[in-house]
Image: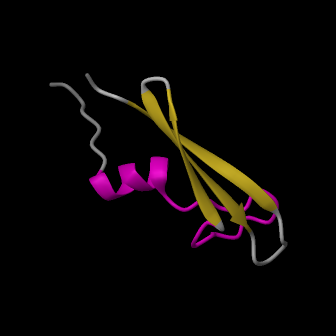
Amino acid sequence: MTLQVAMPMGYLHERYCGRPACPRCGELLTLPEYPEFAERGNGVEIRHVWQCDSCDNRFDTLIKFKAVA
């Protein structure tokens, strides 16, 4: 018998593309201030700039996608 670990798709999506928490105060953020899209080589980068409503901390997140031939 082989042990297999399964994760519902909703949780998998939240792990990689979900809403982040503020690194300073831990507040869960709803929407980024603005996104930036850039094509880099054979992929795409999506950067979101966030600002926490509770402590005004600003930070960004980066998601990279590679193009499939």
Query: Which residue is pictured at 57% across the width and 73% down the height?
Result: 30
Q: How was the colour assigned to the protein in this rendering?
A: secondary structure
Image location of residue 66, percent across then percent down:
40, 29
Query: Which residue is pictured at 62% across the width and 64% down the height?
Result: 34
Residue at the farthest bottom position: 53
Residue at the farthest left position: 1
Image location of residue 12, percent across then percent down:
37, 49
For this view, does 21 lie left or right of residue 9?
right
For this view, does 23 lie left or right of residue 43?
right
Q: Is residue 23 magenta?
A: yes
Residue 21 position by quadrant: bottom right
Residue 48 position by quadrant: bottom right
Vertical arrangement, residue 10 with respect to residue 1, above or below: below
Q: How many marks?
A: 0
Vertical arrangement, residue 51 with respect to residue 39, above or below: below
Residue 1 position by quadrant: top left
Question: Which residues lie in the magenta part?
Answer: 8-32
Vertical arrangement, residue 56 with respect to residue 68, above or below: below
Query: Is most of the magenta stretch helix, strand or loop?
Result: loop
Q: Quadrant of the C terminus?
A: top left
Q: Is residue 15 magenta?
A: yes
Q: Nearer the viewer, residue 4 or 62?
A: 62
Image location of residue 46, percent across then percent down:
53, 46
For this view, does 46 lie left or right of residue 42?
right
Image location of residue 9, percent across then percent down:
29, 52
Query: Which residue is pictured at 83% across the width and 64% down the height?
Result: 57
Query: Which residue is pictured at 69% across the width and 52% down the height?
Result: 60
Q: Nearer the viewer, residue 42 or 5?
A: 42
